[in-house]
Structure formats: structure tokens, C-alpha cells
Amino acid sequence: MGALNGWVMAASAISLATPSAQVQQSAGPAQMRVAQLYPYQPPTYAVPQTSPWETHKVRLAALARQQGVREATIQAVVPYLRPNSRVMELDRAQSPSASSGYLLNFRPYLDRHITSSLINRGQYRYSAHWTNLSRIQSTYGVDPSVIMAIYGKETSYGSVTGTFDLLDALASLAYEGRRRSMFEAEFIAALKLIDQGVRRSQLRGSYAGATGYPQFMPSVALRLRTDGDGDGYADIWRNEDDAFASIANYLRDAGWKRNVPWGVPVRIPPTLNRAAIKSRLNPPRCPAVYRRHSRWLTVGEWRRLGVVPGGRGLPDNEMAALMETPGAYAEGYLLTTNYRAILDYNCSNFYALGVGLLANAIAQR
């Protein structure tokens, strides 16, 4: 060991010596010329290369620390993250939703998504949970049948909640980079859920990061999950009443208006001047979805144009937009701001109209 230490010390001394110092120790002009032509260079050592995935994990850990995530949580999760190629493949395969097309017929979608099974199972839960649903309605003002319809649409009443490991999926989507900032933020939100006591094993869901009975993104779960049964804990992964209250809280946060239906079917006169009712708005979000909607008029104004509402009544002073709906059980629907709250959950006319019509069937309206 002493010899080795001596070798290390000698090597260090050599590496620190300047070429002129070495030349001065040379015996003759030949050696000096060699030293001038080939000056001494200290030895170089290969540095292990870090993989892009490992570099990505270091970035995620740093972002989490900046956001106040506990170090214990970071160390329990980040070193063990694994890239999920299937998640990245599914994300790359995404294309604009068919719901953006103005002339598409609604019937094929509704036939697939408003089935007798969904209606019957929704009615059973609607009845079984009515005590809590009515209390949730009193607190949040949201129609319980819409809550139940969203639960049915999102997870088939809790039977299909997703099997992807949420942390691996979100880290992989951030790594892929198509929507990096969004998925980095969702990854950190998932770590914060662990900080709040949610078990790592519970954080499973869709490949895109939606989790639990309501299929909330982690940032939404952090902000809006709510205790629905009074036990002091909001468990949207195993407790249906907590999921119902959380969906209601989401819709209220999105602008749900108490005691107003999402919309009503209408008869449209053949003389309707569609150019006169065309919306001139240019919404920053989901413009193709809102392109199907007319401008806002009061129900009384619609009546004077010959657009006759049916189903649940809407007061004449309520604002509504008309959407023509080929194949959707009616020529069209007058849509209230509550329909827009459903769109906030999933910005697709196919989705929102499907939820509304399933809700009507569950409540037997």
C-alpha cells in the first residue's frame, strides 16, 4: 500500500510538472527536442456516460424538490422509475377527436356508449347511494344523475380504472416530450399525493395519467378530491361516495348552476335562419367543439324563432345555445352552461351529450 501511495504521489507530481520543468531535468539537446515536439500530457480517464432516461430522472427529482416534495418521497420513487414504451406508443398514436367534425352523426357513438347495461347498473347505484347523493346535491348543487353518468362513462362504475403505473406513465410521457411541461407537472402532483398519504400502489390509471373512480389527473385530484361519506378522508380510488362528491366538486368548480338541466331536446323549424344564429365567438380551447354551438339566446328568444323546447322545462330567461344533433334522439338540443361544465370534464360534444343522455336514462326522465 505504501508503494501504491508513493506511485500515486509521483504520478500527481508528474502531471502537475510543466514541460519546461521536465526539459530542465533532461540530460541533453536530443531529449530537449523530443520534449518540445511531444510535450507531456496528463493521462485521461473515461467518464461513464449517463443515459438520457437517467438524466431525465435527475431533472424530475430537481423539479420535485423545487416544488416542495419531501425528499423521502423523491428517493422512494424516482430512482426506481422505468420508461414505459407502450405508454409512449399510445400517446404518439393520438389524433384529433372525431367529435370536432360538424357533420358527423351522433347515433353510432350513442349506441355504443348508452347501453342497457350502463343504464341498468347506473340506476341500481343511483338508488343504492341516494341518501348520500341527495346530500351531495344539497352541498354542491349538481344533478346526481349527471354524477352517476360520468362515473359510468369514465370507469364503467368503477370496474375499469386503468392498470398503468401512474408514476412510470407520467415520467415516460414527460420524457417523450410531446407535452413535456404538462406531464412533468402531473408527475410532481402525483408525488404530492404520496406526500399526502396516498399509497404508491393506489396510483394506477390510464396511460395518460387519469386515476381513480372519477379518472382525475393528479393535479385535479390534489385540488378537488373530496370526502363524500364523512370519514375525514377523500379516497377516490376505493370509495364510491368520495368519488361522487369529488365529481360534484369538479362540476361546481367548472361553473355548474344549481337547479338547471344540462339541456333539453327541441324541434327545429325548417325556416330557421342558421346564419343569423351562428356564433361569432373564437374560444381558445376546443374551438372545433364549440363550432357546433349557436350563439347564446334566452329560451324565450328561441321560442320566438320557432325552436320549441321539450322534456324538462327551461325558464324563458335562461340562456342557451342550440346544437343540432343528427342521430341523437332529437333534431337538436338547447344547451345550458351546465353542458359547458360537462365539456370541461372532457371537451367533446360526443362525450358531453352522451353523459347528458345517459343521466336522463338513469333518472328515467
Image (tube, helix red, strand yellow):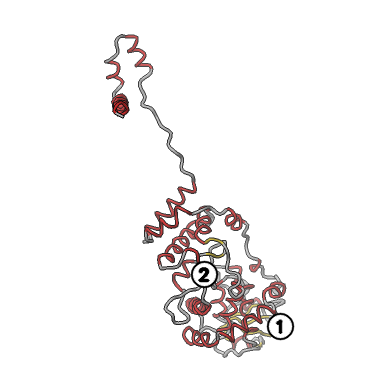
Quarter location, residue 321: bottom right
Establish if 321 lies above or below 308: above
Marks 1 & 2, CB-CB < 8 Å contact: no
Q: Any mark on residue 324, and which?
A: none
Quarter location, residue 145: bottom right
Q: Any mark on residue 216, and which?
A: 2
Distance, label 1 to label 2, CA atoms, is 44 Å
Q: Nearest the camera: 174 or 116?
A: 116
State whether residue 290 appears in this view. Answer: no
- Label 1 packing within 10 angstroms: few (<14), some (14-19), many (20+): few
Residue 92 x/y as whole percent? 60, 55
Residue 196 x/y as whole percent? 41, 68
Q: At x 48% / y 78%, what residue is drawn?
A: 249
Q: Nearest the camera: 159 or 42?
A: 159
Q: Nearest the camera: 303 or 34?
A: 34
Seen as rendered, the residue at the extreme front is 1
- Label 2 packing within 10 angstroms: few (<14), some (14-19), many (20+): many
Residue 157 x/y as whole percent? 60, 76
Q: In which quarter of the image is the N terminus?
A: top left
Residue 347 x/y as whole percent? 57, 70
Q: At x 60% / y 79%, what residue is drawn?
A: 149
Q: Mark 1 points at which residue?
A: 271
Q: Nearest the camera: 41 or 357?
A: 41
